[in-house]
Amino acid sequence: MSGPHPGPEFEGPSSGDEFDRQLRDFAGPAAPEPEFLPCYRHADRNTGITCQRCHRPICMACMTEATVGFQCPDCSGTAAKEQPKRPRQLGRPATAGGSRRGGSGGPGLLQRMQVRATPVTWSIAGISTVVMLANFLTGGRVTGLLALSSLAVEYGQVWRLLTFAVTTVGLFGLALNALVLVLVGRTLEPLLGGWRFAAIFLTSTLVGGVLFVAVTSGPAGVTGMQAGVLGLIAANAAIKLRAGADIRGDLILLGIMVVFAFVVGFGSTYWLTQLGGVIGGGAAGLIVAFVPSRQRRQLAAIGGVWLLCAIVLAASVALR
């Protein structure tokens, strides 16, 4: 889980070359954009999701969750009845195409994990894992460069407001946050597209970081992958609420994560990043859900949140 970083404290601003290197290291691969088409039942709603059976475009209000992907209202009522029963072959394993054990039949590992459909999700998880390994090999120096520190941000190291999203404390914290990230990302990223998913994650991180810097001071480092994950859960709940879907599961998961964060970090102020992550993710989710799905309008609205964060950050630093 996220928490106060026990490593070395910040000692001063780094060089401009170090700033550029950190930004290059943080940048992940570009995610492919889905093709947005009008929903076959609601022509005024554009969507990047298609029915798993008939491949017609469907909006959030028309989606019915299936075993794999989503189905339209017309197909969801007949899917169970029309699904053929495959005869079992004696002496052969149940693989696609009747291939023998050890063959190449059936979906591959990458397909089952939906890596191609969720590149941003797996990029975040992969970068966080690499940061954890590098931090172990360097005795905590990597987290010391990427973790959030109010004093470091005051010295101009503003990249920490985003890079602390790929830092965690301990292997258990990394595993738990990565697991929740994948569970949320496998549904949310194909629905929204890569850039919207990344924007929600980064906005959640930024709001959490700005809230922490505005309230606290000092050189202590704070990790914050959980701030971005909590923001994604809040955004998922906001989008499902707009579609009239049940959000009780999201609220339960969000509550468990928040309570665990309070228990682990009791007595510290790092919970401010978690609170900010929920606020930022919820705001970004509402923007995606209610602002018309034209890329420029949604980018402008999310950009307004970033501008507000910049104003709050500048004011808090100037008043010290």
Image: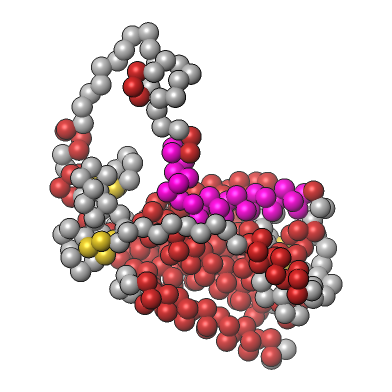
Residue 133 on the magenta segment:
yes
The magenta segment is 111-136
Q: Is residue 69 left or right of residue 154?
A: left
Residue 183 position, x and y percent, is 46, 48
Q: In which quarter of the image is residue 13?
A: bottom right
Task: Looking at this view, name the residue that lies furthest to the bottom.
Answer: 319
Which residue: 48% across, 18% down? 102
Which of the two residues, 10 or 6, is positioned nearer the viewer here?
Answer: 10
Query: Seen in the image, is 7 located left or right of residue 208?
Result: right
Q: Nearer the viewer, residue 54 or 224?
A: 54
* Quadrant in which residue 86 is drawn: top left
Quarter containing the C terminus: bottom right
The dominant secondary structure in magenta is helix
Display coloring: secondary structure
Q: Is residue 267 magenta?
A: no
Residue 101: x and y in percent read 45, 16
**Residue most extreme to the top:** 91
On screen, residue 247 versus residue 147, left or right, reads: left
Count of picture labels: 0
